[in-house]
């Protein structure tokens, strides 16, 4: 359903070959170094539960010999879709420590899609790399959560996030970015490590919107099964209650 992109800096010798690059990953395996369409399923510029301000650090890199625009579309909790074009010169990297504030001059939370092919003047040669992190500062320093960035389309298939934890030290949230123009009823079943159903959370996600909520149950180790009614990018995130750093767990599709 989706391929997790991993930030790769070993681009020596890549520029001369990239003009002939394909837009699909057909015969590449686990590491996807570039794409023309990337989704960051969770971004923020918002004050969180503990009073800490959470921001998103986004890095964009153009490994090609072309100069082209990347269209960034921010989808918020109400389904508003704001668009900004970011021009990338050949070999250029841009780093935004507060992406929503720096690029969209806004606060809140949601998801962002980056696109360089399916826009006016786009091309399958306009590939790029994205790295994402949500970070915050607490009394003893800066802490961050790496956010998996996704390529490929969203799906209605069951998908799983394994490794959630809720106790006095950690909290866990579930969330989805709705990739459809319909209200998306996403059923999130939470299981413990012995496959016992602990609780069910239902997310009613407005069209094209983003929604996240806490798991209202204690468990030392468990997993979440997402069942969306329309295509969605879903995830879980486990957050340390003291430092606010976390572990982002994108939902992986399972098709028996």
Image (cartoon, grey):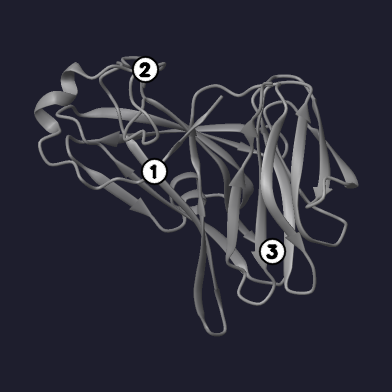
Numbered disc 2: secondary structure: loop
Q: Quadrant of the N terminus?
A: top right
Q: Which residue is mark 3?
A: 48
**x, y percentage for residue 15?**
13, 32
The residue lying toward the viewer, choosing from 161 and 147, is: 161
Q: Is residue 164 above or below residue 87?
A: below
Circle 3 Cα neighbour tier, 10 Å, few/some/many (<14 / 14–19 / ≥20): few
Identify the residue at horizontal 83%, vertical 40% (top origin): 189
The residue lying toward the viewer, choosing from 221 and 85, is: 221
Query: Marks 1 and 3, how far apart in space?
Result: 27 Å
**x, y percentage for residue 75?**
61, 35
**x, y percentage for residue 188?**
81, 39
34 with respect to 169 (left or right): left
Q: Is residue 14 above or below residue 131?
A: above
Please say if the residues under marks 2 and 3 sit with CB atoms less than 8 Å apart. no
Q: Which residue is mark 2?
A: 26
The residue lying toward the viewer, choosing from 161 and 78, is: 161
The residue lying toward the viewer, choosing from 256 and 240, is: 256
Q: Nearer the viewer, mark 2 or mark 1?
A: 2
Q: Quadrant of the C terminus?
A: top right
147 with respect to 122 (left or right): right
Q: Which residue is mark 1?
A: 6
Q: Is residue 190 above or below residue 169?
A: above
Q: Is residue 135 above or below residue 155?
A: below
- Picture quadrant where residue 252 is located: top right
Query: Marks 2 and 1, how far apart in space?
Result: 17 Å
Q: Nearer the viewer, mark 1 or mark 3?
A: 1
């Amino acid at each position: 359903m989706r391929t997790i992109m991993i930030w790769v800096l070993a681009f020596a010798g890549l520029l001369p070959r990239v003009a002939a690059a394909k837009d699909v990953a057909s015969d590449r395996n686990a590491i996807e170094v570039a794409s023309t369409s990337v989704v960051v399923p969770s971004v923020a510029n918002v004050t969180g539960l503990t009073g800490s301000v959470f921001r998103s650090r986004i890095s964009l890199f153009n490994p090609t010999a072309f100069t082209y625009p990347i269209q960034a579309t921010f989808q918020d909790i109400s389904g508003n879709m704001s668009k900004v074009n970011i021009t990338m010169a050949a070999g250029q990297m841009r780093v935004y420590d507060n992406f929503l504030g720096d690029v969209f001059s806004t606060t809140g939370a949601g998801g962002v899609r980056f696109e360089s092919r399916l826009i006016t003047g786009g091309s399958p040669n306009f590939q790029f790399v994205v790295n994402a992190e949500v970070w915050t500062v607490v009394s003893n320093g800066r802490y961050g959560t790496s956010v998996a960035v996704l390529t490929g389309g969203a799906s209605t298939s069951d998908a799983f996030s394994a490794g959630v934890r809720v106790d006095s030290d950690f909290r866990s949230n579930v969330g989805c970015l709705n990739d459809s123009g319909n209200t998306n009823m996403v059923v999130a079943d939470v299981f413990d490590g012995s496959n016992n159903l602990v609780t069910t959370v239902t997310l009613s996600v407005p069209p094209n919107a983003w929604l996240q909520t806490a798991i209202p149950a204690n468990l030392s180790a468990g997993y979440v099964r997402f069942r969306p009614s329309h295509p969605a990018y879903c995830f879980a995130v486990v957050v340390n209650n003291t430092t606010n750093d976390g572990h982002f767990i994108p939902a992986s599709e399972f098709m028996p």
